[in-house]
Image (cartoon, coloured by chain):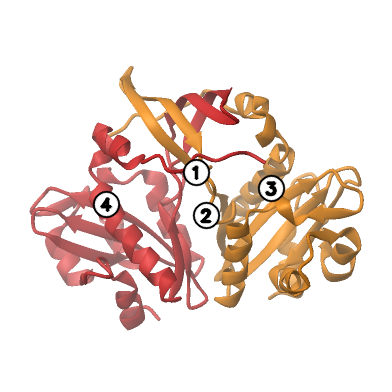
Chain colours: A orange, B red
Amino acid sequence: MLKYSKGIKALEVKHSINNRNKGMELENEINISNTYYRNIQKALIYKKPTPIKIIKAIHHQNTYKIIEAYFMMPSTTDYNGLYKGKYIDFEAKETMSLTSFPLSNIHDNQIDHLLKVDEYDGISFLIVRFSKLNEIYFLHTSKLKSLLKENKKSIPLNYFKENGFLIKSTYICPIDYLKIIDEYYL
Amino acid sequence: MLKYSKGIKALEVKHSINNRNKGMELENEINISNTYYRNIQKALIYKKPTPIKIIKAIHHQNTYKIIEAYFMMPSTTDYNGLYKGKYIDFEAKETMSLTSFPLSNIHDNQIDHLLKVDEYDGISFLIVRFSKLNEIYFLHTSKLKSLLKENKKSIPLNYFKENGFLIKSTYICPIDYLKIIDEYYL
């Protein structure tokens, strides 16, 4: 069986990759929240691995070392899982804007995926952090759908305030999005 | 936004990686089946990307080239998604054995994950191909659970025959596992 890489801290490396840096803080906080949900046996929700196209790998110290690979366009969202028998699916993004979230920050196929999950009776939503305001919003796909019909290029902060929910943060659960689902979508 | 790799065929490369070769045929057939399910708007089920730890990446032709990375131990199964409002989760493996499927072929955390999904009211199962017999079986986690209680190191072919279901294959849907779910688990 394949020997896996252990104990190498990839986080700093990931941080050094310019464009991928943006969402790391949010990603970490969601990962902590998901680990918390798993620990208290509330839900099974994971971040999917980043899709990577491997071009070249060599045999190296009893394992495989990948020496050429590229990031691939994700075909779905970053997070999915199971909560109270329901399928949960979401994408999480940050913006530095004070007034709106640009939809160009999400890939079209990710939006399509969210819409399909909603259509197929799963629970799908967006988590958006307005970093400079330190506010994190939950926006259900049904609300995203209405906005997309109007051909908008961005989601105004006010739209989040009126149609979404502010997500509360605690030390043990920095992004407690399941609370919103409990209150409004189950 | 990050420029993604397109048009490079990674499949052959993947094939050349010795140990990962094993499951490729089965993986391809499941991917074809999942694409078929999506095309006919039956279900939204995807293979998760292979988890990879990135150590070093460089800026290269308007994108990032990963020049050092390693395979990571997967913490969950390879496939999950949504079908008729239910959360679906499974692992797929092949064996060359004519008589039994060695449980050492699945990581412990993958088995734990299947058990948890079952406990949390999702639909979880194993797909196992006996390559030399050209037979593919569906084994629901509830049946895997009973067997694990007996501390078995492998699942005998007969156990699949008695407690699982033979999965039928058609040209458009090589591994039609949802048919089993429709008939027995919904």
Q: Residue at x 59, y 76 (%)?
A: A119
Is disc 2 in the same subunit as disc 3? yes
Tag 1, which secondary structure? loop
Q: Is residue B154 left or right of residue A182?
A: left
What is the crowding at mark 3: few (fewer than 14 residues within 10 Å), some, or many (at least 20)? Answer: many
Looking at the rendering, which quadrant does residue B38 occupy? bottom left
Q: Is residue B106 left or right of residue A82?
A: left
Label placed on residue B93: 4
- Identified by mark 2, the residue type is Ser
Q: Tell us which disc is closer to us: 1 or 4.
A: 1
Is disc 3 in the same subunit as disc 1? yes
Q: Position of residue A158 (x, y in %)?
A: 91, 63
What is the crowding at mark 4: few (fewer than 14 residues within 10 Å), some, or many (at least 20)? Answer: some
Tag 4, which secondary structure? strand
Kindly indicate whether the residue at mark 1 contacts the one at mark 3 (C-beta within 8 angstroms): no
> Could you say which is closer to the camera, residue A153 or residue B118?
A153
- Point out the image quarter for the N terminus of chain A: top left
State the residue position of label 1: A51
State the residue position of label 2: A75
Is disc 4 in the same subunit as disc 3? no
> Could you say which is closer to the camera, residue B134 or residue A184?
B134
Residue B166 appears in the picture as rendered: no
Q: CA distance from mark 3 to mark 1?
A: 19 Å
- Identified by mark 4, the residue type is Lys
Q: Position of residue B25 (x, y in %)?
A: 23, 51
